[in-house]
Image: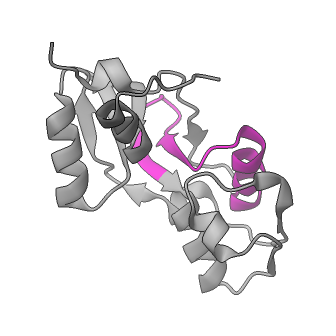
């Protein structure tokens, strides 16, 4: 049987509002232990994705005081130890100002081979899974690797 996005996606999607201040986003992502989130407008429509890379780029752009005990490499790693990360910032910008617009989406029926190919071609690490216009899941390169390795992903 050919596996599809529906079979390997993370179903519990934690989305954020575009008006969320970046300072709150940082705290939220650290608390939830996530590295990205779809961005929704007031009507629940997908308008973007925000990632830890977007946050780091923003921090570098405005020269925030970023104190990282675990090192920059660990922040960029897919599984950093968030408990050792301290971020001090003062900005009035919102998620909408740093998010990636028009994120790449796939349907629930997209075969895993196509998912991997799309991630490689677009040089991205996340795909948002949709049914119609509704977000139903999110996929990371780690999800694809678990599938390829034949390892059952432990859901928290």
- x then y, percent, for residue 31: 78, 43
Residue 37 lies in the magenta stretch: yes
Coloring basis for residues: one colour
Frontmost residue, 2 versus 56 = 2
Residue 33: which quarter of the image? Answer: top right
Q: Is residue 147 above or below residue 57?
A: above
* Residue 128 shows in the view: yes
Q: Is residue 96 above or below residue 110?
A: below
Residue 41 lies in the magenta stretch: yes
Frontmost residue, 13 versus 145 = 145
* Residue 133 shows in the view: no
Residue 75: which quarter of the image? Answer: bottom right
Question: Relative to 40, is 131 on the left or the right?
Answer: left
Frontmost residue, 65 versus 22 = 65
Which residue is located at x 63 percent, y 59 percent? 94
Question: Relative to 27, is 136 on the left or the right?
Answer: left
* Picture quarter with the N terminus: top left
- x then y, percent, for residue 64: 75, 81
Which residue is located at x 62 percent, y 49 percent? 19
* Picture quarter with the C terminus: top right
- x then y, percent, for residue 143: 40, 36
Which residue is located at x 26 percent, y 21 percent? 108
Q: How many marks?
A: 0
Which residue is located at x 57 percent, y 61 percent? 77
Q: From which residue to which does the magenta span run?
A: 21-49
- x then y, percent, for residue 59: 66, 76
């Amino acid at each position: 049987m050919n596996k599809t996005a529906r079979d390997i996606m993370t179903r519990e999607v934690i989305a954020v509002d575009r008006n969320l201040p970046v300072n709150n986003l940082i705290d939220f992502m650290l608390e939830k232990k996530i590295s990205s989130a779809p961005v929704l407008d007031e009507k629940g429509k997908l308008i973007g994705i925000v990632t830890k890379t977007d946050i780091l780029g923003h921090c570098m752009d405005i020269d925030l005081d970023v104190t990282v005990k675990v090192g920059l490499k660990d922040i960029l790693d897919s599984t950093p130890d968030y408990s050792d990360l301290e971020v001090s910032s003062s900005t009035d910008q919102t998620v909408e100002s740093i998010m990636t617009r028009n994120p790449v989406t796939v349907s629930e029926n997209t075969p895993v081979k196509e998912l991997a190919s799309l991630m490689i071609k677009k040089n991205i690490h996340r795909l948002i899974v949709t049914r119609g216009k509704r977000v139903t899941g999110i996929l990371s390169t780690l999800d694809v690797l678990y599938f390829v390795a034949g390892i059952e992903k432990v859901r928290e």
